[in-house]
Image (tube, rainbow, N blue to C red):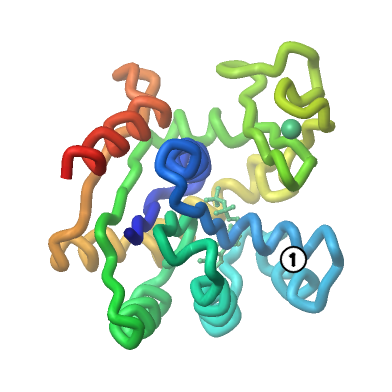
Amino acid sequence: MIIIMLGAPGTGKGTVSSLLEEKTGYKQVSTGDIFRQNIKEQTELGKIADSYISKGNLVPDDITIGIVENRLEEDDVKKGVILDGFPRTVKQAEALDTYLQEKGRKIDMVLNLTTPEDEIIERIVNRRVCSNQQCKAVYNVVMNPPKQKGICDKCGGNLTQREDDKEETVKTRINNYIEQTSPLVEYYEKKGVLRTEVVSKKINHLGKQVADEIERDIKNK
Ligand code: ADP
Ligand code: ZN
């Protein structure tokens, strides 16, 4: 099973992916998390990635494609994988198609999350993440605050704000999404694998509901 998460920054790709991982046992693979881990460990890859990510820009395709292809070779993703944040350009999508074709695998579902832009910005600037890499729980200081300020409910780790979650960088990320990633909606629609879900508090439909619905549909298949 291969599920791809598509959607602008702050639509809840990470939230839905980790809920689906818990429910299904399919492995969440987040390119953003891989980059952040490398930045933290100050690896060569981390240094390169940081020079793009800190400005809100995408990491170059050749680097990103190589990382994902290597990750897809590992045993823990053979049963199922939820690609969270990849592909993000048409070039990445084409490379993934070629790779999967060679392996005799196929994409089962592309879950496209959409959220009104005002809600996205509000959500991102209020987002705090657990700095414990084994946990990575996500909070919102308004909508979903931790019990104790700055401390993760699940593991007691410190909560931090992502460097690229500051308001100036968020605007760049959204524009890059519109220009470089949104063409993938049509790309996957044409392939007949697209499923669009609105994630918005205005209609009381948030990541948790989406994950529940997807889990149900996968089970009933
Ligand atoms: P968000 O979806 O909120 O932007 P992510 O954690 O998915 O957060 O990504 C953080 C950053 O990592 C992106 O802004 C981008 O710079 C980089 N990144 C993640 N995935 C990719 C990708 N597939 N291609 C290029 N850059 C990526
Ligand atoms: Zn934690």
The percent position of residue 117, horizontal first and vertical second, equals 42, 36
Q: Residues within 10 Å of mark 1 (few under 14, many from 20)?
A: many
Q: Secondary structure at mark 1?
A: helix
In this rendering, position of residue 67 left or right of residue 192: right
Query: Which of the 4 quarters of the picture holds residue 96?
Result: bottom left
Which residue: 70% across, 39% down? 135
Which residue: 54% across, 54% down? 173
Quarter that holds the N terminus: bottom left
Which residue: 37% across, 57% down? 4
Beta carbon at label 1 within 8 Å of ligand 1 = no
In this rendering, position of residue 220 left or right of residue 85: left
Q: Which residue type does callout 1 highlight?
A: Asp
**In this rendering, does residue 11 appear at all?**
no
Ligand number 2: quarter of image: top right
**In the rendered view, would you say 96 is above or below 202?**
below
The percent position of residue 88, horizontal first and vertical second, equals 44, 65
Which residue: 26% across, 55% down? 109
The percent position of residue 140, horizontal first and vertical second, equals 62, 25
**In the rendered view, would you say 148 is above or below 2?**
above
Query: Which of the 4 quarters of the picture holds residue 119?
Result: top left
Q: Nearer the viewer, residue 188 or 219?
A: 219
In this rendering, position of residue 133 left or right of residue 143: right
**In this rendering, does residue 209 appear at all?**
yes
Q: Which residue is mark 1?
A: 50
Quarter that holds the C terminus: top left
Q: Nearer the viewer, residue 179 or 91?
A: 91
The percent position of residue 82, horizontal first and vertical second, equals 43, 55
